Image (cartoon, grey):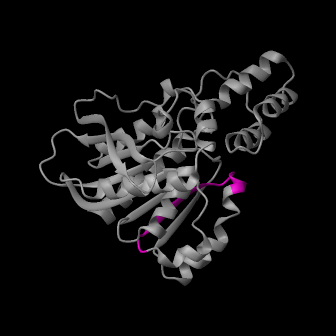
Amino acid sequence: MTKRNTSSTVAIPAKAYELYDKYAHGLLNRRDFLTAIGGLALSTAAAASILGGLMPNYALAEQVSFNDPDISANYETFPSPEGHGEGRGYLVTPAKAETKLPMVLVIHENRGLNPYIEDVARRLAKAGFIAFAPDALWPLGGYPGNDDDGRQMQGSMDRQKIVADLKAAARWLKQLDAGSGKLGVVGFCFGGAMTGLLAAELPDIVDAGVPFYGSPPAADKIADIKAPLLVQLGELDSRVNAMWPEAEALLQKHNVQFTVHRYPDSHHGFHNDSTSRYNKETAELAWQRTIDFFKQHLG
């Protein structure tokens, strides 16, 4: 596995990834997480190196610069009457579009619109899509600049209002004048779960969905999905993977078009190139499949 976070100078034990997954998803508090990491190391310095390798380094995640001449990026607000009243997100468009373009909603992890997700939106624009990445934390002032605070902020919010904001973002993006009217959704972790949820609850809005290592839609919602799905999972992500066999059976039963990829030697978060969970080979393959999938189904 390729590790891009160069702050780590020691090999990261497999158990550390498991602990980080629990911490990142609120199953382990920070004190217990740090104590457990310390128990895996032979010295304080080694523990600090392991911890540094697990935490994001967003300087590593910029594949497309915000001032790349091929794109135009800015922040836009949108109405969300059933959510928090107003939402805001990062809108990125190709700079020289001669025709109306397909659109992709990009949904972040459980910590707000961080620099990695903004870069994902820029990558989509470079590939010829209009990309919009809403920030669920906007009602609280937006992503606070670090993931720990962002995770706590998002955890304090009303989930149903967040969902309503994301639905409002999808509707807003779908009707943009520069867009073709075709809308895809891609999401990561929490965003992966939201991708499936939006496909189920907005079947006339979502035209294609790519959930990365997110939980599947509720069993009683799967029959409502009309959009084709491309599900991207890491083979080592046992927590999320355990949820999918039942969902796959229901997707097949209800004739939903779907493909599931389980990538070997890949953890939860394998696409996030700001942490040591990043697997370069897997991430690049999954991303190319994502772009090809959206081109196929969005035009």
Q: Quadrant of residue 257?
A: bottom left
What are the residue bounds of the magenta stretch?
226-239
Quadrant that contains the N terminus: top right
The correct choice, above or below, for 246 with respect to 136 in the image is: below
Closer-to-camera residue (213/193): 193
Residue visible at 51% across and 53% down in the picture: 161
Residue at point 79%, 40% (across, down): 15
**On screen, residue 144 above or below 205:** above
Q: Is residue 294 above or below residue 141?
A: below
Q: Position of residue 117 (x, y in %)?
A: 46, 39
Towards the viewer: 182 or 264: 182
Between 135 and 36, the residue placed more toward the observer is 135
Quarter holding the C terminus is: bottom left
Residue 259 showing in the rendered view: yes
**Residue 105: percent from left, percent from top:** 38, 52
Query: To which quarter of the image does residue 25 belong?
Result: top right
- 235 vs 89, left or right, is right
Q: Is residue 126 visible?
A: no
Side of 61 where 4 appears, left or right: right
Q: Specify whether 289 is left or right of 43.
A: left
